[in-house]
Image: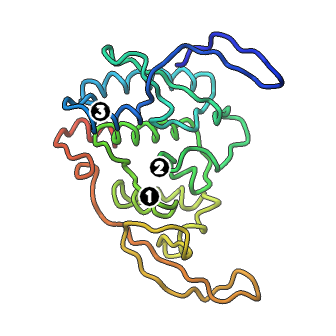
Amino acid sequence: MLKLIDFFYHKEHLFIVTELLKDNLYEFYKYNREREEEMYFTLPNLQKITKQILISLDYIHGLKLIHCDLKPENILIKSYSQCKVKVIDFGSSCFIHDHLSSYVQSRSYRAPEVILGCKYDYKIDIWSLGCIIAELFTGYVLFQNESVQGLLSRVLGIIGPIPEYMMKEGKLVSNFFTREGIIYQEAGEGENTSQSVSEESQHKKKKNEGPIKISLLVPKSTSLKHRLHTDDLMFIDFIK
């Protein structure tokens, strides 16, 4: 984890002094793929990076803290040659016993239980980590999306159905799923690569408004193996 050296106030601003680190993982994997011939994020290097992040998460979870915003931009490189990284940015973190918000985690790394308004715990950080490892390995966001509904559609298409208890427990399920369990979104909420079917909703938001145009999103069925472009079954199983 990022080392705190000092902190002080100046003109009512809090300044935090930390150790000096290098690029974040997002910047570096983009640079590595575009500019360098040798791939940096090989499976051996990913093993080293993943182990360090897991050690960091084990420590903060032991303090009853959830990071709540784990993503490539919040993991910085300490040493390129030794493949050392540090987890940063606890601006969104919260204690497990806090009143937990549904507005946490950057969208592409957001766990289904957060989206659907279920109770969540430390597992949401592990979900984010799986998304990060897949992205570093392939160079592409695992659950590409332009809306929350698009993200859910990708999750269903790649991972499979949302667990039944989440669908029953989630306070926000009706915002994304019809009673028949089909993902929908109102027109203008964002395009998606999944197949969509437009139809006129018979419901009205307010008394004086006309019909609301919605799209039904049909998840495109694929698999982690296909998305990761690898035959390494142990790696696929680990991500899953």
- Whether pointer 2 and pointer 1 mark residues with C-beta atoms closer than 8 Å, the reply is yes
Callout 2: SS: helix
Residue neighbourhood size for the residue with mark 1, other residues' Cα within 10 Å, grouped as few (<14), some (14–19), many (≥20): many
Of labels 1 and 3, the one closer to you: 3
Q: Where does the image place residue 240, in percent across and percent down from the top left?
A: 34, 43
Task: Check the image and name the residue furthest to the left.
Answer: 231
User: Label 3, on which residue?
Assistant: 32
Q: Which amino acid does label 3 sit on?
A: Asn
User: Label 2, on which residue?
Assistant: 108
Q: What residue type is labelled 2?
A: Ser
The answer to whether residue 206 is above or below residue 156 is: below
Answer with left or right where residue 48 lies relative to residue 151.
Answer: left
Q: Where does the image place residue 56, in percent across and percent down from the top left?
A: 50, 22
Residue neighbourhood size for the residue with mark 2, other residues' Cα within 10 Å, grouped as few (<14), some (14–19), many (≥20): some
Q: In the picture, residue 32 is in which quadrant?
A: top left
Of labels 3 and 2, the one closer to you: 3
Task: Check the image and name the residue furthest to the right.
Answer: 12
How was this image coloured?
rainbow
- Residue at image coords 55%, 69%: 189
Q: Which of marks 2 and 1 is nearer the N terminus?
A: 2
Which mark, by number, is residue 145?
1
- Whether pointer 3 and pointer 2 mark residues with C-beta atoms closer than 8 Å, the reply is no
